[in-house]
Amino acid sequence: MQSLDSIADEIRLEFDARTAARDRALSQARTLTRHCANAIRSVHREDRQLAGDNLSEAKRIASALRSELAEFPDLYYAGYTQDALKEFAEANIVYALTADNALPTPQDLELQNATYLNGLAEAAGELRRRCLDILRHGYSQEAERLLNQMEDIYAVLTSMDYPDAITNGLRRQTDIARNIIEKTRGDITFSLRGEHLERAIARLSEQMIGEAGPSGPTLSRAGAEEE
């Protein structure tokens, strides 16, 4: 039989390995989140090259997290790890949808379904931000396209009627996405009405100018006779 001391030594070794893995995972999760945030920021600044570079580095870190935590699944499924991977999903989804590219799947990103869906829900907020950036320059069909993407996302989210323990709190994210989409629809509608109003005013102005004819000083009949 093993002595108590030898049992304790084995436990310490396992705890040391777990603690080291946790510390590395925390550091990697922070770095992964930073690269994802930088990728999204670059998308909004229309620097897709830099966004792609950040996503490539984020993919490398996400892969390292999976491999290094293979022996510690409880650490892989811990909140801080899955939150960082959720940001990874969001950044990739935003990068694809803003360019009208194919949507990456959970399998493409090697993510759990619940993590992917939560990233999909949070992508709605970044798509709204993109819409608002576009609408600052006037109504655009691109804003309508992004709104349609947001509505498609919401339709999928509402179909995931499962307990929060399964979806990792997706219901709350779905409610937030709904509010974001409603606000965005209102902003686009307001912009479209403003565009229609400007066009109507321009047409009316052109019509009035056409009916008035060439402008300029004219002499009255009495004035002409006196001359």
Image (cartoon, grey):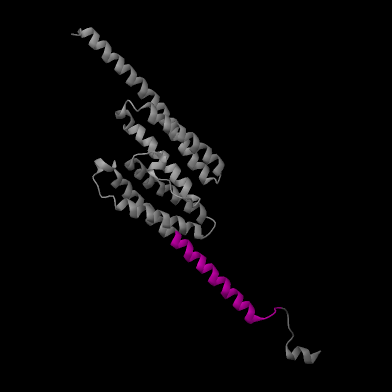
Residue lying furthest front: 1
Q: Position of residue 99 (x, y in %)?
A: 51, 50
Q: Residue at x 38, y 31 (%)?
A: 66
Asked if 91 appears above or below 187 in the picture, the reply is above
Q: Residue at x 31, y 26 (%)?
A: 72
Q: Residue at x 49, y 34 (%)?
A: 57
Residue lying furthest right: 227
In magenta segment, residue 67: no
Asked if 176 appears above or below 1 in the picture, the reply is below
Q: Position of residue 139 (x, y in %)?
A: 51, 60
Q: Quadrant of residue 111?
A: top left
| Residue nearest the observer in this picture, 130 or 49 | 49
Most common secondary structure along the magenta stretch: helix
In magenta segment, residue 201: yes
Q: Classify the position of the C terminus by image quarter.
A: bottom right
Q: In the image, 139: left or right of 169?
A: right
Q: Which residues are magenta?
A: 188-215
Asked if 135 appears above or below 90 in the picture, the reply is below
Number of numbered discs visible in the structure rendering: 0
Q: Classify the position of the N terminus by image quarter.
A: top left
Q: Quadrant of residue 187?
A: bottom left
Residue lying furthest left: 1
Q: Position of residue 128 (x, y in %)?
A: 44, 51
Q: Position of residue 175 (x, y in %)?
A: 31, 50
